[in-house]
Image (cartoon, rainbow, N blue to C red):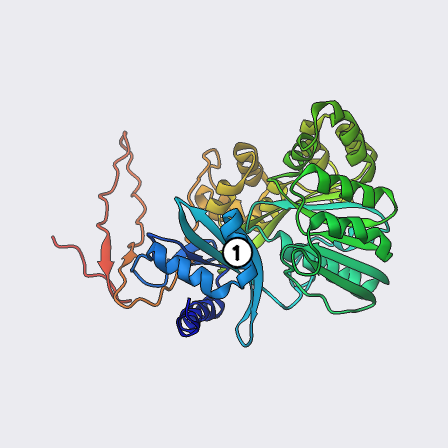
Amino acid sequence: MEPQEKQQIQAIVHKMLAAMVQMKGSDLFLTAGFPPAIKLNGKLTKLNETPMTADQTAKMARAIASEKQWQGYIDTKGQNFAISLEGIGRFRINIFTQQQRCGMVIRTITTEIPDFDQMKLPPVLKEIVKEKRGLILLVGGTGSGKSTTLAAMLGVRNRETHGHIITIEDPVEYVHPHGNCIVTHREVGIDTVGWFDALKDTLRQAPDVILIGEIRDHETMEYALNFAETGHLCMATLHANSANQAIDRIVNFFPIEKHEQVRNDIALNMRAIISQRLVRKISGGRAAAIEILLSTSTSRDAIAKGEIGQLKEIMKKSVELGMKTFDQCLYELYDAGDISLQEVQVNSDAKSELMLRLKLNSKRFIREELPGGGNGDTGGLSLKAEAEPEEDDNQPGQLKVVLPPRTAAPAVPATPAVRPPAMPMALSLEDKPAPPPKA
């Protein structure tokens, strides 16, 4: 690629990244056969309507990668790295191959360390991160905010304790300044040849806290358990949807003859498993729904015996210790007015049980969802979804659906009850009353 062409293509990519930052998006998708798109609050928004070609996506990837990074992609069909653009921000880049064509996903990395209190994280996490030793796991799906929560917790440790914090990541996402602690960031492929070289050398660097960006295999898991066993606090992320699934996944990293020993090691060293999902808020943006499993004699015993199915019940009954399930967290977010009933239903692990609890105990549910605000017959359970705020795509002339207010059916002594005629749906381009229906 000629230098002039490379600069021109870089400028195009940088312009899209600047747009993503301005729109507060999380990811930029560049793939053949689809227009460039940004993920906003979990939804895709196209930057234009023109699908990209395979040649365009390959040239964009080639333009923003270094010679070494591009050669790594050619050799392995995939490559991960990070870039910093002055005046725009820092980004994590994944170049991949799909159907023999090049594609990219570029994620925004927030350079400012997230504030624990502003994120409204459970207070118990602030105490957990000050532990002297043990294993803390942050689990969740891709884009669930694991790294952000981990960075906020590490920020607390950096400010409120003393020692040496080492992070091993691919790539480094949050760069922590030195506080009361010395913070050493090691990026795989740049500051160290590979994961195992970095992990092997870590104990020679007198660490107090070791952060592993992601546990992907049994070798990395063995290092994490070893760090905890030797008196260090080890923090790491793992792809799993819950504490139960995280433990099962860790155990299954190993051959079956080692499963019992691995469960015992987890039970002995685990301090907390924090599971996280992002749910849409009524006011816009997203909130973290967090499940917390802490180390107690009961939870340790269940893990050691392989009774993983008991952990949900243990969390439910240990709220006073700081534990909670996803459904308990969703209940709190709904009752506080942060999320809609529809969002509760979509994300609940045990929908029927949670809906019954809302019906019986939630003041908001009784006020808004039950007939008569809870003053009349409450035998029926309404499952209507709250209206969520309209999304402004800055597209003039966009159709808006305007629903006229419902009129209550008049009381009729005869049976069966007469249903009032349905009102027609009005569509308008502007915010003005819809014309009355024609007679």
Residue 137, quarter of picture? top right
Front residue of this view, candidates 126 and 129? 129
Q: Is residue 390 visible?
A: no
**Image spot of residue 404 (x, y percent):** 28, 55
Front residue of this view, candidates 318 and 16? 16
Q: Is residue 17 visible?
A: yes
Q: Is residue 342 left or right of residue 423?
A: right
Residue 188, quarter of picture? bottom right
**Image spot of residue 391 (x, y percent):** 39, 60
- Residue at left 53%, top 37%? 355
**Image spot of residue 436 (x, y percent):** 18, 58
Q: Residue furthest bottom?
A: 87
Label 1 sits on residue:
71
What's the amino acid at mark 1? Gln
Front residue of this view, candidates 178 and 23? 178
- Residue at left 76%, top 49%? 199
- Residue at left 28%, top 68%? 396
